Image: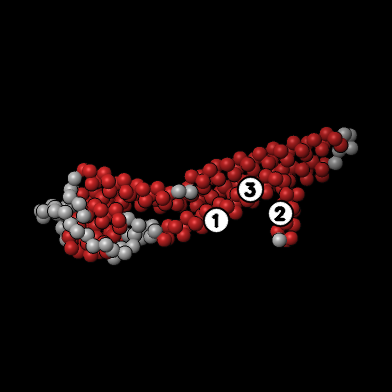
Amino acid sequence: MTFVQDALAKVLELGGPVVLLLLAVSVLTTALVLYKIWQYRSARVGQHKALASAIAAWDRGEREAALDKLSHSQSYLVPVMRLALSGTQDTMLAERADAEAEERFSQLERGLGTLDMVAQLAPLLGLFGTVIGMIEAFQKLQSAGASVDPSLLAGGIWVALLTTAAGLAVAMPTSLVLSWLTARMQRERVFANRALRTIFAPTAQTWPREPLQVAHGT
């Protein structure tokens, strides 16, 4: 505990409260990123091989094969596809399936807004700290009067610019992770939209479209 307090005191002395704030933000951001990665892995985001096979079988008119493949999928989209496959071909059911899919997307996208806010505000916080540091440096320079020590000004500027570097160090990786997570969710939406459209308008429409009792899968 004493070690942590000493480290925080050194950070506060070197970079000021802004750097300390950015350090806290970086810790919280890292925790959020790790949680999102765990959440995506648990939901099997991007892992839709069995689900894609089920949709392809349904598109060919192989109903029983489609239902069997669906039961082997562990994707978070399985309940949505099960809902679509178990009903009749009508607009209301299609809208309900779309809404269910969006609900699941919304759950997976929680926290991305926070990452976006960090990516935008961290550089501004760093710049704010730099401005404050520059003001303090020039105040010291003014107080020195005629006996100006160039190292005094240089040291103040160095410490001030440290906050800008800290802000960029937090913002850049956060922006990269946010872009990666956003791109993954965009691909999920494309996949789900195509799958639902295939279910409600399959290529093989020669067979009747009666309501089915779909077995629950994993």
What amino acid is found at the position of numbered circle 3 in the picture? Leu
Residue 60 seen in render: no
Q: Within 10 angstroms of label 1, few (less than 14), some, or many (20 or more) residues?
A: few
- Depth check, mark 1 against mark 3: the one in front is 1
Considering every residue shown, the one lying at the far right of the view is 147
- Looking at marks 3 and 2 on the same chain, the residue that comes earlier in the sequence is marked by 2
At horizontal 11% and vertical 53% (from top left) the residue drawn is 208
SS of the residue at dot 1?
helix
What amino acid is found at the position of numbered circle 2 in the picture? Leu
SS of the residue at dot 3?
helix
Residue 39 seen in render: yes
Contact flag, marks 1 and 3 (Cβ < 8 Å): no
Quadrant including the N terminus:
bottom right
In the rendered image, which residue does mark 3 sit on? 22
| Total numbered circles | 3
Q: Quadrant of residue 141?
A: top right
- Looking at marks 1 and 3 on the same chain, the residue that comes earlier in the sequence is marked by 3
SS of the residue at dot 2?
helix
Q: CA distance from mark 1 to mark 2?
A: 19 Å
At horizontal 67% and vertical 49% (from top left) the residue drawn is 20
The foreground one among 66 and 124 is 66
In the rendered image, which residue does mark 1 sit on? 31
Contact flag, marks 1 and 2 (Cβ < 8 Å): no
In the rendered image, which residue does mark 2 sit on? 8
Q: CA distance from mark 3 to mark 2?
A: 12 Å
Quadrant including the C terminus:
bottom left
Residue 131, percent across and down? 69, 37
